Image (cartoon, helix red, strand yellow):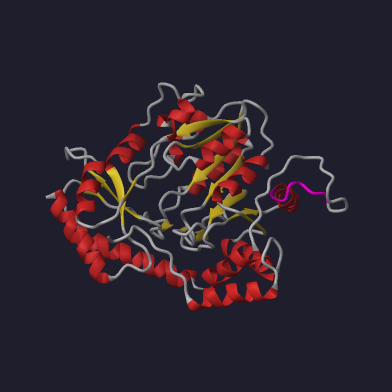
Amino acid sequence: MIPVCEPLVTPRDIELVNDALASGWISSAGKYLDQFEERWAAYCGMTYGIAVSNGSTALDIAVDLLKLEAGDEVIMPTFTIISPAQSVVRSGGIPVLVDSDPVTWQMDAGQIEARITSRTKAILIVHIYGHPADMDPIMALAAKHGLTVIEDAAEVHGAEYKGRCCGGIGHISTFSFYANKLVTTGEGGMVLVKSKEHADRARSLRNLCFQPGRRFYHDSLGYNYRLTNVQAAMGVGQIERIEETINRKRAIAHAYNTAFAGIPRIQLPSEMSWAHNVYWVYGIVLGEEREADAIQIMSQLREHGIETRPFFLGMHEQPVFQHRGLFLNERYPVAERLARKGFYLPNGLTITDRQIADVVKSVKECLA
């Protein structure tokens, strides 16, 4: 079976992890945590980094920084993983959904202003599958209406929007360092912020809101969302070679794009003129003219020994939110088409040229 994605662990990663272990600093303090936070914030063009246990907990903290009151609204895409929406709901806020752009699959910036109300507090961007969202009009809207912009940049390590690094454009950003990400710590995440006030608050929140001068005294409810020094050591090694990782991802995508060019009734990943796509995953979308849906083709590919993954199911179609009375009777046709017709192929860093050729051959046979 050719897997969808495999992490690449190098001797350098092992060297740094072993050094962290040998130092005795194996928990939530140590030199590698400081290095990881500082280097990733600097790489993305932000001031402060706060390492946390995973990307979902990073979103919890980012949303907490908004200080939402019950009924406050946060505009976000419907086409995303559930983490951003659940962070908003758990905070007492209400997610307000926007459909996807049919070409880039990103949140459609042109639909956002119509969704802004007097209760809107923030716009939560999710950069999807390695390609940036269209940030300039979103930031302009935020400035016009006095809104905070959170970038969920979990899927776009190193991607660029008009020469600026994703995760360094909004007011707050979040990252995941799960095993399938371009930079991985196995499990892990980070919140990036520009203000010291936000940084101090985020550091307190991730560590149960202990007080600096009185450890077991609390005036706020926090979380136990700490990252370990050992995990951070691996992250430091991963940052050192991120450009090499991005180049390999782009080479894999180029190989697929070339092989699939000219096949009718399928949509390949885009790269707009203002974007530098890192192709976190390589997705294809079946045309509406094709009777088969993604699940059928994925099942056939599994019989060929090819592992695949489906695209996200929109938040408006998630039973957990419908049971709460959210998004009832809402329709988002682009996101619905992507969910039913889209899936992604193996593009892990360890994939070989021969395996890519095998994937291409199998896809062509299944689509024939």
Q: Give the image location of residue 154, x and y in percent.
A: 50, 53
Pick whichever, 101 or 330, lies toward us.
330
Asked if residue 231 lies left or right of residue 244, the reply is right
Asked if residue 318 lies left or right of residue 168, the reply is left
Snapshot quadrant of residue 24: bottom right
- Whether residue 262 is visible to the viewer of this picture, yes or no, is no
Q: Give the quadrant of the N terminus.
A: bottom left
Report the label total.
Answer: 0
Q: Which residue in the rendered view is the most extreme toward the right? A: 213
Q: Give the image location of residue 297, x and y in percent.
A: 21, 46
Snapshot quadrant of residue 37: bottom right
Q: Is 230 part of what is drawn in magenta?
A: no
Q: Which residue in the rendered view is the most extreme toward the left? A: 368
Q: Give the image location of residue 50, x and y in percent.
A: 66, 56
On screen, residue 96 above or below 83: above
Asked if residue 255 lies left or right of residue 238, the reply is left
- Whether residue 288 is visible to the viewer of this picture, yes or no, is yes
Residue depicted at x 50% and y 63%: 183
On screen, residue 107 above or below 40: above
Magenta: main secondary structure: loop
Residue depicted at x 46% and y 59%: 181
Q: Is 209 part of what is drawn in magenta?
A: yes
Residue depicted at x 39% and y 39%: 100
On screen, residue 19 above or below 186: below
- Which residues lie in the magenta part? 206-211
Residue depicted at x 19% and y 56%: 304
Snapshot quadrant of residue 68: top right
Pick whichever, 59 or 304, lies toward us.
304
Pick whichever, 74 or 368, lies toward us.
368
Q: Give the image location of residue 239, x and y in percent.
A: 54, 69
